[in-house]
């Protein structure tokens, strides 16, 4: 196991109970990932490959730990020269450009707050973020966002002082990232005293994906990086001699779960594939060509993979596969294992946390289960009054914080104490996700509390109906929602994306309805079936069920 990881925690656990009881993180109060992990690795292993970046055009670039130290130092000097200081807010709209990683490390060294954001933001989105967070600078790739939305937003964004362009595009009022990096010094000295960072200082701000209402601002401190040790080491199972690919845009928190902190704690190579549109055969070819050893992606990616002929690709180097973001349908698990021999290990967490539950390397794991609690968190399932429920009983997944706030837990919703209090009070943080726990402590997902369907006195979780439908070969993707009904309260609706070779028809609707009746309880079958070409999703790949329901949020 990697030495930098063992510096902060014991490296091996014999079983889950050992892991749960004995895993601890021991870090100094002034821990800063950029200095205490990346720069240390640059000292100890300067020539070791830290990141391999490639894009759809076939360009490749390798970065060693020493490369990243020099580039992050230059970037820190460049940004500090603009007046970026500790606590300043800087938004990064960089898709999968390698400059994202350089900029993040530089902001950590300065002590500024990094705000990852998607390139799909409109002018309205950018104005909202600039003014809610008080953003001082934006670093953006050379896309239409810069020329149109950011420039248009500036007039309504009084705190925005600097617009920085990554790439070849030159626009009036914009600073060239590349030109300034060439001029900047490669030497940077860690600040001392009050200018240095503390674990409790703000480090990272996420705007949540906004499935309900306007996005919330989730603030994390410097302990967030430490809390991703379990993510990479005990869930992704990355190794120092391996190469890890997590499928994620840098505007999504999953990027920092799978392409940053934990992976470099374990000294593995982070693989970045820069693409605009997901094409399953192209992604599979990349996994084969670059000999990816560990892989993580949302369930949607796996749903597309199993519709391909996986025998056409050399996946022999792939030894471990994981997923999170939404619950994984058992049918997808079974087909992927049949094709590759690999069990997909599932986990659960939120933007407000790191990984809460997982099928860890020190346990067997269970198909369809979210796993068991990460040792960092005092997780539980409770009823409406906050009481723990019995095994087999559905309740809400929560984190108990009455004995202390764990590493990785958010600081609260920035500038919104009332919203924070609604979700986190009386020593309990409520996730809004429903699950049940079996006798051995494994958690099984039911759905978001808002998405549970109440029909004729029954409470029906969308996931179980979706899983039944996914077993039918005609179904590529599906979302289950409730539709108001005068007698039943709600009836079940299935919104279905068909697999290649299938066409919508009344006969197919009836076939899918009968399939659900046979596969699960008859009262759970969808009385309404709608065929669509795609499902509405957030940037992180989660299905917007509220949009399918037609809710106004």
Image: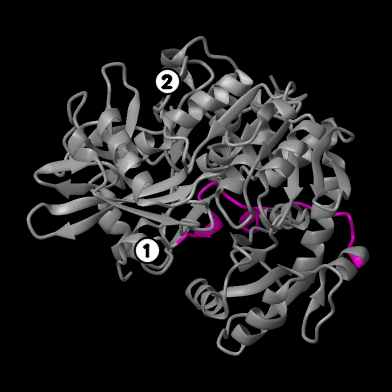
Quarter of the C terminus within the rendering: bottom left
Give the residues drawn in magenta, as a range. Answer: 183-209
**What's the coloring here?**
one colour
Could you tell me if the residues under marks 2 and 1 are in contact, i.e. CB atoms within 8 Å?
no
Q: Nearer the viewer, residue 323 or 363?
A: 323
Determine which residue is flagged by label 1.
547
Q: Classify residue 47 as left or right of residue 464.
A: right
Q: Nearer the viewer, mark 2 or mark 1?
A: 1
Residue 227 on the magenta span: no
Determine which residue is flagged by label 2.
366
Figure disc tally = 2
Q: Classify residue 38 as left or right of residue 11.
A: right
Name the residue rendered at 30%, 29% in the picture.
519
Residue 201 on the magenta span: yes
* Res. 467 visible in picture: yes
**What secondary structure is marked by label 1?**
helix
Q: Residue reaching furthest top?
A: 14
Instruction: Where is residue 369? Give x, y as percent.
Output: 39, 27
Cα distance, mark 2 to mark 1?
32 Å
Q: Give residue 517's quadrant in the image.
A: top left
Name the residue rendered at 73%, 56% in the picture.
106
């Amino acid at each position: 196991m990697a030495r930098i990881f063992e510096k902060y925690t014991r490296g091996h656990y014999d079983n889950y109970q050992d892991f749960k009881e004995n895993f601890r993180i021991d870090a100094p109060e002034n821990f800063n990932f950029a200095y205490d992990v990346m720069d240390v690795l640059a000292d100890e292993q300067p020539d070791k490959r830290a990141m391999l970046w490639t894009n759809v055009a076939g360009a490749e670039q390798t970065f060693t730990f020493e490369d990243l130290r020099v580039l992050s130092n230059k970037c820190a000097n460049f940004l500090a020269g603009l007046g970026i200081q500790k606590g300043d807010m800087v938004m990064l709209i960089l898709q999968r450009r390698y400059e994202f990683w350089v900029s993040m490390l530089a902001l950590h060294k300065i002590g500024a707050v990094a705000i990852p954001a998607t390139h799909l933001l409109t002018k309205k989105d950018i104005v909202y973020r600039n003014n809610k967070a008080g953003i001082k600078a934006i670093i953006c790739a050379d896309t239409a966002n810069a020329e149109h939305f950011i420039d248009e937003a500036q007039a309504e964004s009084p705190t925005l002082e600097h617009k920085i362009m990554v790439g070849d595009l030159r626009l009036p009022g914009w600073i060239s990232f590349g030109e300034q990096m060439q001029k900047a010094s490669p030497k940077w000295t860690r600040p001392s005293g009050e200018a240095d960072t503390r674990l409790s200082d703000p480090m990272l701000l996420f705007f949540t994906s906004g499935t309900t209402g306007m996005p919330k601002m989730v603030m994390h401190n410097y302990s967030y990086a430490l809390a991703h040790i379990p993510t990479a080491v005990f869930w992704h199972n990355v190794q120092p001699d391996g190469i890890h690919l997590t499928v994620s845009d840098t505007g999504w928190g999953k990027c920092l779960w799978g392409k940053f902190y934990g992976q470099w704690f374990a000294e593995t190579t982070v693989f970045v594939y820069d693409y605009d549109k997901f094409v399953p055969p192209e992604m599979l070819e990349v996994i084969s060509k670059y000999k990816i050893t560990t892989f993580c992606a949302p369930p949607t990616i796996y749903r597309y993979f199993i519709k391909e002929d996986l025998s056409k690709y050399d996946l022999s180097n792939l030894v471990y596969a994981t997923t999170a973001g939404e619950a994984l349908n058992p049918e997808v698990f079974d087909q992927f294992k049949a094709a590759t021999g690999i069990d997909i290990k599932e986990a659960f967490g939120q933007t407000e946390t790191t990984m809460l539950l997982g099928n860890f390397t020190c346990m067997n794991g269970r198909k369809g289960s979210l796993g068991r609690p990460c040792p960092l968190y005092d997780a539980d399932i409770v009823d409406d009054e906050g009481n723990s429920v019995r095994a087999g009983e559905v309740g809400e997944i929560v984190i108990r914080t009455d004995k202390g706030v764990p590493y990785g837990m958010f600081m609260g919703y920035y500038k919104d104490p009332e919203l924070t209090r609604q979700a986190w009070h009386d020593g309990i943080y409520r996730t809004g996700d429903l699950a049940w726990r079996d006798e051995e402590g494994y958690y099984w997902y039911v759905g978001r509390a808002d998405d549970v369907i109440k029909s004729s006195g029954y409470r029906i979780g969308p996931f179980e109906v979706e899983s039944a439908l996914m077993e039918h070969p005609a179904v590529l993707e599906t979302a289950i929602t409730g539709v108001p009904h005068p007698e039943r309260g709600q009836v079940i609706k299935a919104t279905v994306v068909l697999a290649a070779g299938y066409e919508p028809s009344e006969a197919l609707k009836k076939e899918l309805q009968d399939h659900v009746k046979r596969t699960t309880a008859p009262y759970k079958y969808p009385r309404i079936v709608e065929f669509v070409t795609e499902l509405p999703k957030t940037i992180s790949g989660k299905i917007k069920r509220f949009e399918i329901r037609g809710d106004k949020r």
